[in-house]
Image (cartoon, rainbow, N blue to C red):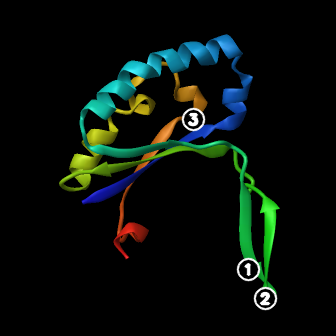
C-alpha cells in the first residue's frame, strides 16, 4: 500500500531562528534522513517552498491568489511517499523522519501526518 507523509512547520517560529541555528538543526536532520531513505520504503521525498498560489473556482471563473488560502502559521514543508504493509507500518517508517527524531524542535511546530493513498494516476501507464 502507498501512504503520503506530510510534514508541517510553524513558519513564524522558523523565521525567528538565526541562519546558524537553522543550519545546526538541519545538520542534525541529516543522519535521520539517511536512516529514513535506508528503510527502502520511501519512494519519493519532496521539500516544498513556502511560496504558493491558490486556485479556486468562483462565479464560473478560476481565481488565482497568493496562498495560503486560510490564515495559518502552519505550513506544509515536505511530502513523501511511503510504501508499507499497512498504516501501522507506514507510521513506523515515518517515525524515522527528523521531525520525530531531532531534539529541541518542538517549538518549531514540526509534525507529520501519514495518510493512506486511495488512488494514483500514473500518466506513464496510459
- Image point (71%, 15%), residue name: 18
CA separation, marks 2 and 3?
A: 38 Å
Looking at the image, which is closer to me, 16 or 48?
A: 48
Q: At numbered mark 1, what does the secondary structure look like: helix, strand or loop?
A: strand
Q: Position of residue 8 (x, y in %)?
A: 55, 42
Q: Are marks 3 and 1 in contact (CB under 8 Å)?
A: no
Helix, strand or loop under label 2 = loop
Q: Residue at x 36, y 64 (%)?
A: 117
Quadrant (top left, top right, bottom left, bottom right) of the N terminus = bottom left
Quadrant, the C terminus: bottom left
Residue 32 percent coordinates (x, y): 36, 24
Residue depicted at 68% across the width and 36% down the height: 11
Picture coordinates of residue 119 (x, y %)? 36, 71
Residue identified by numbered label 2 = 60
**CB within 8 Å, label 2 to label 1:** yes
- Mark 3 lies on a secondary structure that is loop
Residue under circle 1?
57
Dot 3 or dot 1: first in sequence order is 1
Q: Is residue 97 left or right of residue 46?
A: left
Which tag, 2 or 3, sits closer to the chain's start?
Answer: 2
| Mark linked to residue 109 | 3
Which residue is at 63% across, 45% downward?
75
Q: Is residue 51 visible?
A: yes
Find the distance from the CA under tag 2 to the CA under tag 1.
Answer: 6 Å
Amino acid at each position: 500500500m502507498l501512504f503520503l507523509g506530510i510534514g508541517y512547520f510553524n513558519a513564524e517560529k522558523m523565521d525567528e531562528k538565526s541562519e546558524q541555528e537553522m543550519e545546526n538543526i538541519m545538520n542534525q536532520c541529516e543522519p535521520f534522513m539517511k536512516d529514513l531513505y535506508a528503510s527502502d520504503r520511501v519512494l519519493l521525498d519532496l521539500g516544498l517552498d513556502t511560496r504558493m498560489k491558490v486556485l479556486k473556482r468562483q462565479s464560473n471563473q478560476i481565481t488565482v491568489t497568493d496562498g495560503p488560502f486560510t490564515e495559518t502559521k502552519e505550513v506544509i514543508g515536505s511530502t513523501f511517499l511511503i510504501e508499507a504493509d499497512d498504516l501501522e507500518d507506514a507510521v513506523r517508517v515515518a517515525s524515522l523522519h527528523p521531525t520525530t527524531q531531532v531534539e529541541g524542535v518542538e517549538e518549531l511546530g514540526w509534525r507529520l501526518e501519514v495518510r493512506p493513498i486511495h488512488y494514483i494516476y500514473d500518466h506513464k501507464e496510459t
